Image (cartoon, rainbow, N blue to C red):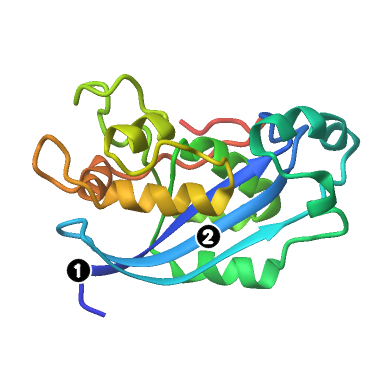
Amino acid sequence: MSKQKKLGLLVDVETTGLGPDSDEIIELALKLFSYRSDSGEVIDILEEDSFLREPTSNSALKNYNQAYRVHGIPFESVRGKSFYDVKIKTYFHRTDSVFAHNASFDRSFLYRLYPEINDLKWFCTMRGVPWKKYGFPNGKLLTLLQSHQITDYQTHRAMDDITYLLELLKKTSPNGNLYLREILENGPMRKYQPTGQAKMG
């Protein structure tokens, strides 16, 4: 692999709610792709997978019906399912960088299952581009997909979201750069600080 060619991993989770301490991931989608670190050009999609799991904590189970209104995943679809951890970890071990829209959310949930992800470089596609400065009403994924004529409809299923997100990253910003390049130039996020952990420095 040339020095410029890197592997990126797009991730998205669907959860039972907003709190990583009281809610759980029920769906995870992963898409491994190659890109040029100098230009941000996406070269190829190498592998992709999505997984479902049944939540186990009482708080996550209690919140399921409310979350269902957003993600539309019936409980029957996740009942008895669990994540294939070995396969999921191979994605994290292979990648140079992880990308997610509102990455702090995805990362806070994934950290509970796979703490080693905190050693990876994480990039937020929502905060890594000055969307409002570029004239978009906000940085929400659906708003950006509509504004770039990618899709008018968001299913809130994890694989659909990262498939559309990759199309967005291939587009050219008003600055004339590919969005992926701008996100890379903006730099990775700081490491995740789990609740209750003393902040360094």
Q: Is residue 153 visible?
A: yes
Tell me the residue at 62%/53% (across/down): 28
Of residues 81 and 121, the one drawn nearer to the viewer in this rendering: 81
Q: Position of residue 41 (x, y in %)?
A: 21, 60
Tell me the residue at 73%/62% (across/down): 83
Q: Position of residue 124 (x, y in %)?
A: 39, 40
Q: Which residue is mark 2?
A: 30
Q: Position of residue 171 (x, y in %)?
A: 22, 47
Image position of 65 with respect to 118: above or below: above
Q: Which residue is mark 1?
A: 4
Q: Would residue 167 appear left or right of 57 to someone viewing this image?
A: left
Labels 2 & 1 near each other (Cβ < 8 A): no
The amino acid type, in three-letter code, at marker 2 is Leu
Of residues 190 and 178, the one drawn nearer to the viewer in this rendering: 178
Q: Would residue 193 appear left or right of 41 to someone viewing this image?
A: right
Q: Secondary structure at mark 1?
A: loop
Q: Is residue 118 visible?
A: no
The amino acid type, in three-letter code, at marker 1 is Gln
Image position of 135 with respect to 17: above or below: above
The residue sitting at the bottom extreme is 1
Of residues 116 and 70, the one drawn nearer to the viewer in this rendering: 70
How crowded is the residue under tag 1: few (<14 C-alpha within 10 Å), some, or many (20+)?
few
Which badge, 2 or 1, is on the more N-terminal residue?
Answer: 1
Tell me the residue at 78%/32% (across/down): 22
Tell me the residue at 57%/40% (across/down): 156
Q: Secondary structure at mark 2?
A: strand
| Quarter of the view holding residue 97 | bottom left
Q: Position of residue 128 (x, y in %)?
A: 31, 36
- In the rendered image, the quadrant that contains the N terminus is bottom left
How crowded is the residue under tag 2: few (<14 C-alpha within 10 Å), some, or many (20+)?
many
**Number of numbered discs overlaid on the protein picture:** 2
Distance CA(mark 2)–CA(mark 1): 22 Å
